[in-house]
Amino acid sequence: MATPDLLFNLRNLFHLGAYQAAINNSDVPGLDADAAAERDTIVFRSYIALGSYQLVISEIDSSAATSLQAVKLLAVYLTGDKEGAISSLKEWLSDSAIGSNPVLRLIAGIIYMHEQDYNEALKHTHSGGTLDLHALNVQIFIKMHRSDYAEKQLKIMQQIDEDHTLTQLANAWLDIAVGGSKIREAYLIFQDFAEKYPMTGMVLNGKAVCCMHMGSFEEAETLLLEALNKDAKDPETLANLIVCNLHLGKPSSRFLSQLKLSHPDHVLVKNATSSEANFERALQAVA
């Protein structure tokens, strides 16, 4: 008889973006040492997702397990000490005793994805081994516009556990990347999540992106405003609202201002700033 997966609900909350709920429901009794370490990893990654980097740095000490040290490294990287974090990351990855740790490899993939160094990310994630690593590979290949490779990773995930939340999410990401008739399939995946689990900003954004692809901008706007009520600073919600409002012919400058203030490095902010600078140069050239 299979033993129950005591961390199923906790993992699900994290993968669907219900980070505070994951933290609040992390007191799971009856965990062995490995499961307790995984629980702590999920909790600290949830704090990182909520922007509480310093809390993670201060609570994980040097005697903690490798998986937790790796999560701490991600928090250090996100506070702005990128050079220090990448230097430590390289050192740990080259250590034969811990370099193959799946969480360390996952964090390496996430950090190099932030750096937009996708080839370096894949060096550490391509061999997979966990659903988290395969899901990250799907994201990396989508970023590289290689949906064919992303599909191969998805098939591996489906062989491991077709119904797993991460597998379903990866399926939806790939469907959106491929586009066309696949958008409807992605929408149905997010709709299924919405019916089964607490509604999160991630699920609302997923549905909204599908709606925009299908030309249903009014429905997308409703979903995105609901997501904004859950987190007024979420960068993807703000970015999607800017795009949605442009299609609806509504002003989007307030959402762009919010995005500039809370996430100045967001790709949409960089593109807008670059466009504004080019426009100013063009004006001066004809003045």
Image (cartoon, rainbow, N blue to C red):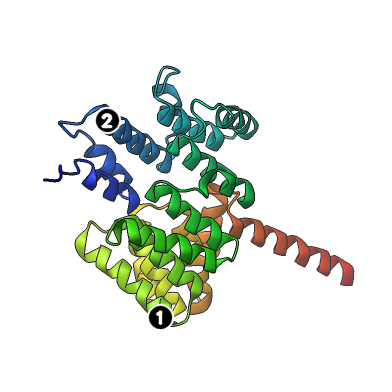
Q: Quadrant of the N terminus?
A: top left
- Residue 272 as seen in the image, left or right of residue 197: right
**Crowding near the residue tagged with mark 1, few <14, some 14–19, many ≥20 C-alpha atoms within 10 Å:** some
Q: Residue at x 36, y 69 (%)?
A: 207
Answer left or right for 273 relative to 4.
right
Given the current orientation, which residue lies at the most extreme top position?
Answer: 63
Q: Position of residue 263 (x, y in %)?
A: 54, 49
Q: Which residue is mark 2?
A: 36
Identify the residue at horizontal 82%, vertical 69% (top origin): 283
In the rendered structure, the answer to whether residue 223 lies left or right of residue 246 reads left
Kind of residue indicated by mark 1: Ser
- Of helix, strand and loop, which one carries label 1? loop
Q: Which residue is mark 1?
A: 216
Q: Identify which amino acid the numbered label 2 is placed on.
A: Ala
Q: Earlier in the sequence, mark 1 or mark 2?
A: 2
Q: Report how many numbered discs are placed on residues in the image.
A: 2
Q: Nearer the viewer, residue 100 or 264?
A: 100
Q: Considering the numbered disc 2 on the image, is that residue within a helix, a strand or a loop? A: helix
Q: Position of residue 196 (x, y in %)?
A: 20, 62
* Mark whose residue sits in front, 1 or 2: 2
